[in-house]
Image: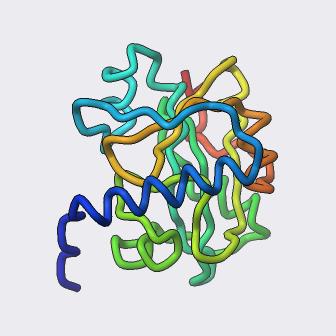
Amino acid sequence: MGSLPLMTEAAEQQSVITVRTALAQRGVSGQVRRLDDSARTAVEAAQALGIEVGQIASSLIFLADGDPVLVIASGGHRVDTSRLSGVLSGATITKANADDVRAATGFAIGGVAPVGHPEPLRTIVDVALSHFDEVWAAAGHPHYVFPTTYDELLRITGGEAAEVGESGESGK
C-alpha cells in the first residue's frame, strides 16, 4: 500500500465545497470554519476551537465484514470494536486503512466529514455526543470544521444512535 499524495489547494477547495454543498442540501445552518492550524486529531481540533475534546465528532471508517461503516464518535474516547460489532449484528470489525477511507468517503484521514460521500454509508452516531449542546465535525479537510448538534448529526447522516465508546469512558 503506497501513501496517498498530499491534498493540493484545488483538491482542498473541492473537498470543502463538497461538504458545504451537502450541508446546505440538508438544511444545516452552521458555517464551515477554517482553522489556522491542522486539526487531524480530536485533541488538535478541540484545542484550536477552545472546547472539550468530547465535543469533537470524529468521523471514522471501520469495515464490518468488509463493508465500510461510518462511526461518528466523540473525540473523548476510543471506539470499542466489540461494542460496535454488537451494534452491527456481530459483524467482524476492522479499522479501515487510508485507501479504504478515501474510497468510502472521498476524503483523506483527518478531514473525513459526516456527509458528502460518493455513496451513502451506514452510519453509527455515538450517544456520548448527546451530552453537548454543540459539537464540531471535520468539513472535508484537516483545516476545516463545522458546528452542529447530536440531533442534527443523526438527521443529516440518517445515522443510528449507539454507545460505541470503550467501557467506563463517558466521551467527555
Residue at (57, 30) in percent of width and height: 147
Residue at (39, 20) in percent of width and height: 49
Residue at (59, 40) in percent of width and height: 165
Residue nearer the viewer, 76 or 41: 41
Q: Quadrant location of residue 55?
A: top right
Q: Is residue 12 left or right of residue 93?
A: left
Q: How many labels does the image show?
A: 0
Give the quarter of the figure containing the N terminus. bottom left
Expressed as whole percent of the image width and height from the top left, the position of residue 155 reads 81, 46
Instruction: Return the residue found at the far top.
Output: 50
Expressed as whole percent of the image width and height from the top left, the position of residue 120 reads 70, 71
Residue nearer the viewer, 24 or 153: 24
Expressed as whole percent of the image width and height from the top left, the position of residue 57 reads 55, 38
Residue at (36, 78) in percent of width and height: 99
Q: How is the image coloured?
A: rainbow
Q: Quadrant location of residue 63?
A: bottom right
Q: In this view, does 79 lie to the left or right of 153?
A: left
Give the quarter of the figure containing the C terminus. top right
Q: Is residue 154 left or right of residue 121?
A: right
Expressed as whole percent of the image width and height from the top left, the position of residue 82 reads 61, 58
Q: Quadrant location of residue 123?
A: bottom right
Is 127 above or below relative to 112? above
